[in-house]
Amino acid sequence: MYTTIKVSTTLKAMLDNMKMSASESYEDVIQDLVEDHMTVRPEVLKQLEKSKADLKKGKYITLAEMKAKYKR
């Protein structure tokens, strides 16, 4: 099943520039972008694991504490 989407001429030009060949479909270009977006870099995963460990240890500050600390 297919659907139609509406994009600006600027975005269409950007998608055109991302094509590897003239015959590549917009679906392929968009699929590549989505897959790239969903891939998490190893350094980000490492930081997420560290943050989760800090949270379990109680090493965090609340939003209220953050607002009080950086109140202007």
Image (cartoon, helix red, strand yellow):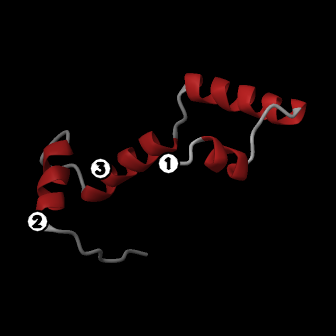
Which quadrant of the figure has residue 52?
top right
Q: Position of residue 9 (x, y in %)?
A: 11, 65
Residue at coordinates 32% horizontally, 58% vertically from top-left? Answer: 27
- Give the residue drawn at x 16%, y 51%: 14
> Can you say which quadrant of the picture contains the N terminus?
bottom left
Q: Is residue 9 left or right of residue 4?
A: left
Asked whether the residues under the numbered discs 1 and 3 touch, taking CB atoms below 8 Å apart as contact, a structural biologist would say no
* Secondary structure state at the residue bearing disc 1: loop
Q: Residue 58: image x %, image y %?
A: 87, 34
The amino acid beneath tag 1 is Arg
Q: Is 57 above or below relative to 11?
A: above
Q: Are marks 2 and 3 in contact (CB under 8 Å)?
A: no
Q: Position of residue 3 (x, y in %)?
A: 36, 77
Above or below residue 70? Residue 8 is below
State which tag comes first along the sequence, 1 or 3.
3
**Amino acid type indicated by mark 3:** Val
Residue identified by numbered label 2: 9
Of the image marks 2 and 3, the number of the one nearer the N terminus: 2
Q: Is 15 left or right of 34, judged from the image as shown?
A: left
